[in-house]
Amino acid sequence: MIRKKIVEILESNDLLKDFIIYGWVKSFRNNQFIALNDGSCLNNLQCVLDFENTAEELINSINIGAAIKVKGTLHESQGRGQRVEIKVNELEILGKANPEDVRKTILSPKRHSLEKLREQAHLRVRTNTFGAVMRLRSKLSYAVHHFFNQKGFNYVHTPIITGSDAEGAGETFKVTNFDLKNIPTNEAGEIDFSQDFFGKETNLTVSGQLEAETFALGLSNVYTFGPTFRAENSNTSRHLAEFWMIEPEMAFCELDGNMDLAEEFIKFVLAYVVEHCADDLAFLEQRLLEEEKNKPKEQRSPMPLREKLDFVIKNNFKRVSYTEAIEILRNSKPNKKKKFQYLIEDWGADLQSEHERYLVEKHFKCPVILFDYPASIKAFYMRLNEDGKTVRAMDVLFPGIGEIVGGSQREERYDVLLDKMKALSIDPEELWWYLETRKFGTCKHSGFGLGFERLVLFASGMNNIRDVIPYPRTPQNAEF
Ligand code: 4AD
Ligand code: MG
């Protein structure tokens, strides 16, 4: 007898054959019908019990949440709602679930808020919504590797522990193995990091970019896909303190090629899940419609989920310079009527999420790539333009999300880079290895970073980034 996943059984035509199935009980009706789920797909498998010939004690243990093993025969279903079902020949309880206790959890069969699910994050993968999101997340991450692999990019594992702050924003989590109650200091009273594990000050990485750049300058096209950490005190539905980032880096490539790659990449991975996650996406689309039913019309999504994904896959992203965008924003209704929280007055202003979303959702009504930002609001490594005041930066902005990608052409000129670092008080000694790549065969190169959870957020139609990662880390929260 062979063991099958429920997804295989539901697609199978092996009627009258015997199978072994494992899963968790979702519901049990009339002492007869078990809805079984093993997470292999959204749908449950109906297992029909011959209750007259089943011991009462066993029947009493078939409770919601219990883990069971079923041996049975596949039949066409007599009932409505499913094509096939399993007639149970043997049933074994592998892990009991006490109904009294289950009732207090999100496993109980009623609607639970997403907040409640977060409080029981260790159980939420058993819910339809979170299960669907996690399958989608897994498929998306597979699609990421698929895309870069087929384009000949090498996957590089950049370090998690590092001595540098790639973004220079000072939002790093420190790494140390000092006894925090007894931190060694030097004569000047400063912390003596030479006695720490690495003999220097270290932190968790905020981005693998700098190391990825060094690899691109040898392997030509590379990408990283790993966890990154930011001690940024942003309590929003778009920020995590620990998130996964995909960072491709290409040698001999300028900003236009970088924008092309970002657009092609996003379209590819979305098309991949549209094709391979049909059931989960249909479910998530329905979930979103339900959720938005009670919202005023202007707060609802303009398109159902799958239509929105199709729209992004089929239409060109609009490419607009920062300077043009500022003009649009300055003359926009919400700016004139002082509806923006941060009003746009002068060139040079940093764009807030409200501005990004205005451009995408109200003005252009499609994904937008903004480029050539003022040097003063961007990181040190971006290539300075001829005008001396803008850099070859680009951000991809998405409806409902705002910034999903941040990238740039890199400053490949040694002297210009050195001057920039000095101007921003970034110690050239600390980044000597990064600078050195500009001395030995430097070349034009570009790359970007895509926040993986923002992508999952967009693809799933969920509203809070905490609901698209297994265990979210946010300010004041690192439970589980
Ligand atoms: O714009 P960011 O900060 O760019 C970089 O880190 C560059 N080193 C990338 C590169 O050029 N290789 O971050 C890139 C993306 C953002 O566009 C956003 O999608 C995501 O990472 N991101 C976050 N996602 C969740 N929570 C946060 N706190 C995030 N901060 C950035
Ligand atoms: Mg950014």
Image (cartoon, rainbow, N blue to C red):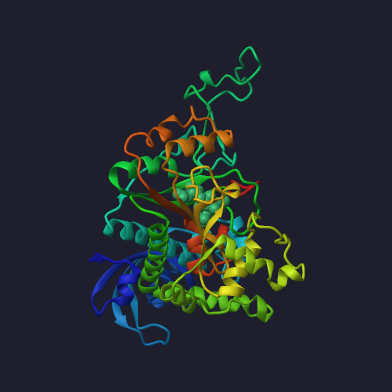
Give the residue at x 55% y 69%. 399
The image position of residue 155, as x and y in percent, is 32, 48
Is residue 461 visible from the viewing direction of this image?
yes
Q: Position of 245 compared to 91: left or right?
A: right
The image position of residue 19, as x and y in percent, is 27, 69
Along the viewing direction, whichever of 420 and 281 lies nearer the viewer: 420
Vertical comparison of 66 with 86: above or below:
above
Residue that sits furthest to the front in the current view: 387
Count all numbered tags in the image, as a single digit.
0
The image position of residue 117, as x and y in percent, is 59, 61
Is residue 103 visible from the viewing direction of this image?
no
Along the viewing direction, whichever of 391 and 5 lies nearer the viewer: 391
Give the residue at x 54% y 79%. 303
Give the residue at x 35% y 40%. 442
Give the residue at x 43% y 84%. 81
Q: Position of 441 compared to 393: left or right?
A: left
Along the viewing direction, whichever of 329 and 220 lies nearer the viewer: 329
The image position of residue 164, as x and y in percent, is 50, 35
Along the viewing direction, whichever of 475 and 383 lies nearer the viewer: 383
Residue that sits furthest to the top in the current view: 187
Q: Quadrant of the N terminus?
A: bottom left
Residue that sits furthest to the right in the current view: 337
Vertical comparison of 204 with 125: above or below:
above
